[in-house]
Image: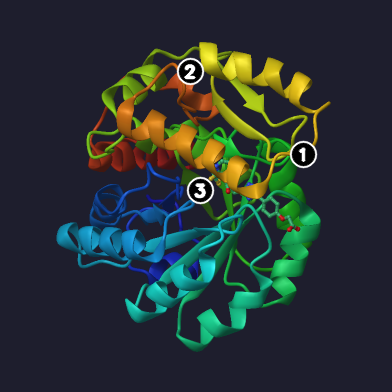
Amino acid sequence: MSFELNNPLFEKLGMKYPIIQGGMAWAGTGHLAGSVSEAGGLGIIGTGYWKADKVREEIHRAREVTDKPFGVNVMLLSRHIREVFDVIIEEGVKVVATGAGDPSPFIEELHSHDILVIPVVPSVGLAKMMEKKGVDAVVAEGMESGGHIGSLTTMTLVPQVVDAVNIPVIAAGGIGDGRGVAAAFMLGASGVQMGTRFLASEESEVHENFKNAVVKAKDIDTLVTGEIMGNRARVLKTKMSKNFVKQERIEIQKPKPDADAIEDLENGSLRRAVKDGDKTTGAFMAGQISGLITELKPVSAILEDTWAQAEKLLN
Ligand code: TUI
């Protein structure tokens, strides 16, 4: 007996599992996203603050590993989003996910090119607004997630979004194995998104220091930066992130830093974690579920094992 997938969206995309890989900036490379799609999930390239040329290159890298559809996540705080959307349209990408903002101005245009639009939402209000604008599904993301986060937990957000909208709801935040997937389905979700679990995969291209840090992390080893300055983001505890939180309390008394300085700080610190494994100045964005992840696995095993465990529980 197998649990019925009640998500036509995933059938349309030819997915074997109702599992999406979160579009992680710097970490969600074409190779990782392509590998997830190839193995039966939906991979998503995380474009963060990347310029259009880099996005095009990673789309091509995804196509080296799969002929299946994959998505591209557009991070709406970036100044390069217009050019990034142009590349997505030119390259015939099938799915756009968005994060860290309101994608309303782009939805009609993306639909006119037959691109599915799946925004990440941190609240019921935004989910309802997105449904009104005609999006194809929403990812309801709790604050257990790594990176930029809202303030509700997955347990509280998902059922409230499920009750508020009539489009598929994909749960994200704190899901790392089949128990989490089964729980999300019990809350009414019809799919899940996992990010941190895929960071610690063989196909993930983050620095080995980053992978090891996720594997070694315990339950209480993340903290949230930006509580004071804004742009709350969950990262692994390091000397640097602990110090950042302290510095924020000092910085807030000073005149506001300019946009370029903030972008350099955010983009640079994440790049240094992902590319250089730099524990002194890097921001290792990862979710609270890091504590559950104790080994690196191939993407195919992550999908297979997770879904096998979920199906057993759901049946
Ligand atoms: O976007 C994410 N997670 C991210 S983006 C990112 S890149 C970055 N790096 C450094 C600092 C900031 C960003 C790293 N992680 N998740 C999806 C998400 N979207 N979480 C929360 C939201 C969100 C927040 C507000 C979505 C919409 C929103 O709307 C506000 C509005 O404009 O109404």
Q: Are marks 3 and 2 in contact (CB under 8 Å)?
A: no
Which secondary structure, mark 1?
loop
Q: Is residue 200 left or right of residue 51?
A: left
Q: Going 70% across and 35% down the picture, which residue do you hit?
A: 153
Q: Going 17% across and 57% down the picture, which residue do you hit?
A: 65
Which residue in the protein does label 1 denote?
256
Query: Cβ of disc 3 within 8 Å of ligand 1?
Result: no
**In the picture shown, does residue 124 fall above or below 285?**
below
Measure the alpha-carbon separation of dots 2 and 1: 35 Å
Q: Position of residue 90 (x, y in %)?
A: 35, 80
Q: Is residue 302 left or right of residue 232?
A: left
Query: Given the image, on which type of amino acid does mark 2 rest?
Result: Gly
Which secondary structure, mark 2?
helix
| 22 and 60: which is toward the camera | 60
Residue neighbourhood size for the residue with mark 1, other residues' Cα within 10 Å, grouped as few (<14), some (14–19), many (≥20): few
Q: Is residue 66 left or right of residue 235?
A: left
**In the picture shown, does residue 66 fall above or below 224?**
below
Which secondary structure, mark 3?
strand
Which residue in the protein does label 3 denote?
192
**In the picture shown, does residue 248 fall above or below 233?**
above
Which residue in the protein does label 2 denote?
291
